[in-house]
Amino acid sequence: MSLGGIPSQGSAVLRPPIADSWRRSRLFGVEPELDRGAISIGEVDPRSRLMTAARPVLDQLVEQLTGTRFSILLADRDCRLVFRWFGDRGLQHQLEELGVLHGSQLSEGRVGTNALGTPHESRQAVEIHGQEHYADALKRFSCYGHPIRHPLTGRIEGVLDITGESDSGNPLFGPLVKHVVGDIEQLVLESARACERRLFLAFQQATHHRSVPVAVLGGDLVFANETCIEHLRPADPTLLRTLLPQVPERGVFDTRLDVGDGISLSVVAERVEGSTDGAVFRIARSTSSRKPVPAPAKTARSVLITGEPGTGRTTEARARAGVDDPVVLHSAAALREEPRDWATRFTDLVAQPGTAVVLDDVHLLPESLLPLVGEALDNPGSARLLLTSVPSDAMSPAVAAIAARCAETVTLAPLRERLDDLPTIAAAMLRDEYPDRKPHFTGTALAALRTHPWPGNLHELRAVLREVSRLPYTGVIDLAQLPPACRGSSRTRQLGGRELAERNAIVTALRASEGNKLRAARELGISRTTLYRRMQALGVTDDCPLL
């Protein structure tokens, strides 16, 4: 029941923060009958900056609560449980039965309204008592949760929660949790400053020889010498942040990085000793020659070019036609005019030897006209014929039968599968639209573009770049200048290539199933529980741009 749009429990209307959380829980698809299988268990770092700072404060809190029937829970910035303590074995057994284990992901999207997930989502401290919990299994508890913010950046570093078995509140616990969080935040600040010193010393040592391009990244800090900045143009040093998750704790990480405008760099990275997330990046070698424009390919007399809408099918067909100005005949025109007129025009065009005809979107052609196309494909004396179409698995049987008669088939990959080429493609589009401008993308902007799913492929990318170009020209395209839908989250901008491919596969399956997670999981060949876990890990939400 609800009153005036506000969810209610029984006859009592929920407090606004709790009502907001219930709404989010429903949007996440959480059921009141808690599904423990939806809670993922992952690895956590016991030596993280948060745990290092929180440990002495938590030890003191444990002393204060020893002998009580309360628990202490600490989650990290991903709302994954990194610390738990129980003052009572019975309470421990109850919470573990619900999935409150070391490494559990306890966000609102997993378990609904709770004192870890709700502060993490709302960025505010909350008290949740008894029936205010969304999941029935949690209604026996009273909980106090408070987000832990980084004092310098304001970013959520974690959430602290005190939970007890009761349906009523204790007025002392709210101020207690707030005080403890303040102590943790102070130690996080001191740790950050110590980390900054280690990163700066590492930068000084690495730049002993000025000619070596070097950058040091960690947390929200970036140190880079002028040689590095010059090498990373048209991007910027923060592009290296996308590689941070791939740098091992020990040893050297070696890879190539495409920074746009046809520039590819060889990058060698290793961790900064004593730092949890810092690394030294050395630009070992640079190849800055622009990629040559390929000459038109020599193709067979008949070619089928397939791909999703917006992948550049018509452009590819023109390039493969072998003539400067091939005739493009749109199949959709046969839906607007008399089929006999369209058939006459098609017959006249293909009857001219030495010419090239691009038959665009053959999958839209009325079935009655397909035999005419088949006849032209089988006639060796007719013009070169290039057909464009949707992928083969989306063709009707009649169209697939015609497509099979083409001598050559070219399949164009969607943009989400060509992320390494995206900077070069975007730069080329900007040059085509605005030849007098030579803007460059910052690293964070490029990282965000790589995480976008691009349902409209090249058409969508061109539209985004036109939107960006309407802004005042500064020579630099940064994250803030991208449309909001393309900015992504800080987590997704740090995903590696394999993770991005997995994320895009999930998003594509969700789009095809219209958001039905069970159907999407079947399409991907995984369980729904695995799908939930990977969605959470890869930052796929229900408001993803593709859905």
Image (cartoon, rainbow, N blue to C red):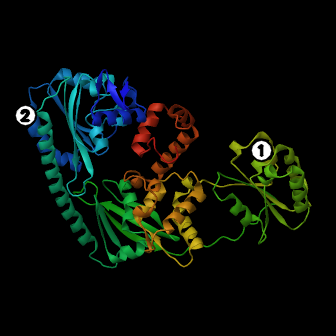
Task: From the top left corner, tell me how far across and down residue 296 is, in percent.
Answer: 72, 69
At horizontal 33% and vertical 26% (from top left) the residue drawn is 8
Q: For mark 2, what is the residue?
A: 64
Q: Nearer the viewer, residue 163 or 409?
A: 163
- Within the image, what quadrant is residue 291 found in? bottom right
Q: Earlier in the sequence, mark 2 or mark 1?
A: 2
Disc 1 marks a residue whose amino acid type is: Ala
Q: Nearer the viewer, residue 452 or 266?
A: 452
Quadrant housing the N terminus:
top left
At horizontal 15% and vertical 24% (from top left) the residue drawn is 88
- Within the image, what quadrant is residue 192 found in? bottom left
Can I make out residue 39 in this image?
no
Q: Are marks 2 and 1 in contact (CB under 8 Å)?
A: no
Can I make out residue 244 in this image?
yes
At horizontal 18% and vertical 30% (from top left) the residue drawn is 71
Task: From the top left corner, tell me how far across and down residue 532 is, in percent.
Answer: 43, 36
SS at mark 1 in the image:
helix
Q: Is residue 10 left or right of residue 300?
A: left
Task: From the top left corner, tell me how far across and down residue 158 is, in percent.
Answer: 25, 44
Local packing at callout 1 (Cα closer than 10 Å; few below 14, some 14-19, many 20+) is some
Q: Which mark is residue 229?
A: none
Q: Which mark is residue 400?
A: 1
How many badges with numbers are in the image? 2
